[in-house]
Structures are given as C-alpha cells and as structure tokens.
Amino acid sequence: MQQLTDNFNRKFEYLRLSITDECNFKCNYCLPDGYQRSHENEFLSHQEINHLVTAFAELGTKKVRITGGEPSLRKDFSDIIKSVSLVKGIRKVATTTNGYSLQKNAQQWFDAGLDAINVSVDSLDAKTFHLITGKNIFQKVMDGVSACVAAGYKQVKINSVLMKGLNDQDLALYIDWIKTQPIQLRFIELMQTGDNETFFDKHHLSGMWIKEKLLAEGWTQQVPLSHDGPAQIFSHPDYQGEVGLIMPYSKDFCKSCNRLRVSSIGKLHLCLFGEEGVDLRDLLAEASQKEALKTRILLALEDKKESHHLQSGNTGVTPHLASIGG
C-alpha cells in the first residue's frame, strides 16, 4: 500500500474533511460578523466525498474528522457519516460541532457510524458563552453533550478556545466539571488568521500556564497515541475526565503533524495556514479517476513544509478557521 509520508518522515493517517464552510454561530474569534459566502462553488457532493475518502483510505488514512463550518447544517450529514464509516480501511469517524442540533441528533449520528465527537463550548458560564458565540443557547448545547455521553460515543471531547479576559477565569469550573464526567477538555490557543489580528493581540494566551498548573496539581502528561497529533494529554487519578492542550505556538508543534485537510469545495490543504490549496475536485467525479487522484495527493505532499511558522507571525492566506475546516 502507498503511504502518505512527507519529506520529514511524518506519516498522515488523519484526514480533516470539511463538508461546508457555512456556520450559524458568530464566534468573536472566528466569524464575528456571521457567515459570508466568499465563493460560488457548490459544496462537495455525497458521491464526491465517497470517492475522496476511498482514495485517502487506500493511501493509509485511518481516521476521518468531518468538519465545517458547522457540518450538521448539511441535510445529508447522517448519510455522509454512514458512507464514510463504511469505506474500507477507515477505523474511526469523528466530527466537530458547535452543538446547535446535538441534543436532537446525537443518537442518530452515533447509529450512522460516528465514533467520536468534539463539541465547541468556549465557556461554562452562560453569559460568557453568549458573549463569545453570539448564541444564547448554553444549556441546549450542554444537554447535547449529555446526550452524547448517553448515546455511547467512544470519545466525547469539549473544545474551548483559550482567550485572555474572556474565558480564562473559567478554568476552575472546567476542571471541577470533569471530576465526574468521562470527557476530555481540549484547550486550544487562540490562533491568528488573516482577519483577527487586533483580536488576537488583545486576547491571545499561552497554554503553558495551564500546563504548569496541571503538573503542580498532580496531573500527569500521557504518552500520545499515533492519531493524537500535537495535543498534549493530561490525566489525574481523582478525575474521570482528561485535559488536552493544543499549543500551536509552542516549540516543535509541527513535529507530530499527522493530518491533512480537504476543504468543502475540494481543495487539499497541507497546513491550516500558509497556502492556497491543491484542487482535487476535477478528479472526484468518477471512481475511475481514483489512481490519478491518489497520484495528485502524493505529489502535493512533497511540498509540505516543516513548520507553519506561526511563531514568526506568518498567518498565511487563511482568512478564518471556518474557511478550511479548522
């Protein structure tokens, strides 16, 4: 089997596949003015998605995360989950959602073949949640999280973008919450993109202060699994939950990169930052194009850079994280 390996001996077994760049939230760090469509292209069809995932699976991809925007805005979301889960070689299907329709659909998605779910919850305080997301539905989202635990997902994670002066005071609430919840909290450093420079300068906060606090309070850093990527995971014998830290400005962050991204209009992105993408869509119409598609993906990977250079202030051309699936 051909393998997705770059010039720095990194192996890519994880595909983040966006199925829409549309989102119904107005998060202040991503889409403060709401979603504005910036292209005329239709989103990838169900058939195109199946052809794409099949090719990636034959190149060694084992995990697919279906992303957006907000992926559940697609009416065929459950059908997409089912078809991706049935592709030979794919062992894990995950998604990331803002939780808007989670309570209603958690069981249906699980039954369709979804293994793991990440829910964006940027504050455990209802007022702060409303301030950050533009949606006054905190309890609805939390009920959705509970529905995921009840449905039996192998993994339920909570994503929170860490922001100075907005939600950093929530840390104690988060940690107390996972004492009795089998959930992994993932604190993600705020990242600078093309259109949030002022916001970034005001609110960026390093995750190192959380790491130091966790270690001082008896938490232990775990040895990462091959599909964990750059997250640093911490556990504690007195807590059912775990804490994950994603710190893209830390030293050697890109060393463990194991993921590639395809946008909702069929462009392969080798990094969340820094490039325009390689168009794959002309090779997604027919199953007979699979070998040409695999060749193009392999050739593109030869150009993957060693680092995103975020720490040097390079944000590339990414306008906002919803544009290529975060």
Image (cartoon, rainbow, N blue to C red):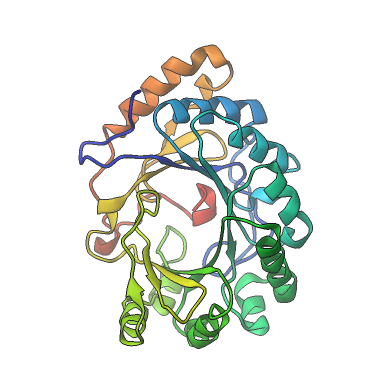
Residue 240 % position (x, y): 52, 74
Q: Relative to 131, does residue 65 appear above or below in the rendering?
A: above
Q: Residue furthest front?
A: 237
**Residue lying at 36% horizontally and 79% vertically, measured from the top left:** 219
**Residue lying at 33% horizontally and 24% vertically, measured from the top left:** 2
- Quadrant (top left/top right/bottom left/bottom right) for the N terminus: top left
Closest to the observer, 295 or 57: 57
Q: Relative to 33, does residue 171 appear above or below in the rendering?
A: below
Closest to the observer, 202 or 74: 74
**Is residue 245 something one can see in this rendering?**
yes
**Residue lying at 64% horizontally and 32% vertically, measured from the top left:** 83
**Residue lying at 67% horizontally and 61% vertically, measured from the top left:** 148
Residue 235 % position (x, y): 41, 73
Query: In the image, 137: left or right of 278?
Result: right
Q: Relative to 170, does residue 255 appear above or below in the rendering?
A: above
Residue 101 % position (x, y): 74, 58
Residue 26 % position (x, y): 63, 65
Q: Residue furthest right?
A: 104
